[in-house]
Amino acid sequence: MIRADLTLVPDPIADLGEGVPEPLRRRARTRRTSAKTQERQAFPAPAPIPAWAWASGRADGDPLFAAGATLALLDSFLRRDPPAAGALRSRLALQSAAASAKILRLNADAAALRDLRFAVGDALGPAAKLLRLWRELAERPPSLDPGRLAAAAAALDLAAPNADVLAESLREQSRAGDPVSAAAKAAAMAFEAFPDAPAAEAEVLALWAFDSVLALRLRWPQPLPLIATKVLDPSSRSDGGGRRPRPGDPGWPKAAAGAIALAAAAALDLAADLARRAETLIAVAPKLRAKPAQRSVDLLLNQDCVAPAEAARHAPMTDRAARRLFDRLSALGAVRELSGRPTFRLYGL
């Protein structure tokens, strides 16, 4: 039986404003043991999700129990400060933007959204704004600050009725109960704050609020965009059919718990894959002869994908040298080419 006061952290945070009081521990830097070899500790992959947790995340299981289990495993992994944590957040932001595009009925899949991140010269369209919304959520400390709420609403062309009142209501609501239930209630409140707005846009903002509250309650220094990645999963519908529960519906708390259970489990699977790929990248980094190569490695560990031109700006190096570097990394099996194009190629873990 799940207790009503289930919590995933020792104590609820006192202030749900900008930032978190206790940042996660940083891992120690690797020390050079000789001129030719480096001492490097292999970073272990996260523990696999047990089959019962996947099953309990479905509509016919106990989703709140599964959500607590999978989030606990995910939280434990993140607190070890994995090298590819930035890439994990960036990849989940992309997935959340792609799911949000489906909710808004926009013709933009993950591949198209990847390209939109590098678009220049034109005003941001709805799909590009979606990607920026989720990327900014993942890159900044979690917050229910009125300015952040107003900016998130504006990205969805929503006019917040009163950002200060809404922010205070969300902060008050998010303090009650276990983290998952509190996040679900805050999402419902955010959705209901826009009664005259299109339901799809209000729902995306509610999902954004859910991830913000969850990160605050779990004391994550940066949120993981989670719930949107699984909110469209067919298993979240009760009795295997009918309309998908939305924030504020009677079936929303159970659907939200099931979605976050599945999302956390999928995020751990993704984290395990990225951890293995990051280990390969870190292992081959000393073989790279280009002096600015380490900055490109850092970009790859922190982004969903990197364009050679982007790496050239950060290194700095010429575009041609950057293309050669990524060809070398690809040949060594340290990165993957993600675009499938012969030109303007994108690389990632």
Image (cartoon, grey):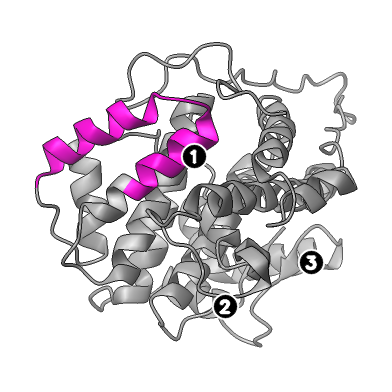
User: Dot 3 lies on which element?
Assistant: helix
Depth check, front residue: 113 or 182: 182
> Residue drawn 44% across and 54% down?
135
CB contact under 8 Å: marks 2 and 1:
no
Q: Which residues are magenta?
A: 162-188
Location of the N terminus by quadrant is: top right
User: Dot 2 lies on which element?
Assistant: helix
Q: Amino acid at mark 1?
A: Pro
Q: Nearer the viewer, mark 2 or mark 1?
A: 1
Residue 292 visible in the shown view: no
The residue wearing badge 3 is 330
Q: Main secondary structure of the magenta part?
A: helix
Name the image quarter holding residue 134. Answer: bottom left
User: Dot 1 lies on which element?
Assistant: loop
- Number of labels in the image equals 3
Determine whether 306 is above or below 74 in the image: below
Query: How many residues crowd around disc 2 within 10 Å: few (fewer than 14), some, or many (20 or more)?
Result: few
Residue 55 at what x, y percent from top left? 81, 52
The residue wearing badge 1 is 223
CA distance for labels 3 and 1:
30 Å
Q: Amino acid at mark 2?
A: Ala
> Residue drawn 43% across and 68% down?
117
Residue 102 at what x, y percent from top left? 47, 77
Q: Nearer the viewer, mark 3 or mark 2?
A: 2
Picture disc at residue 111: 2
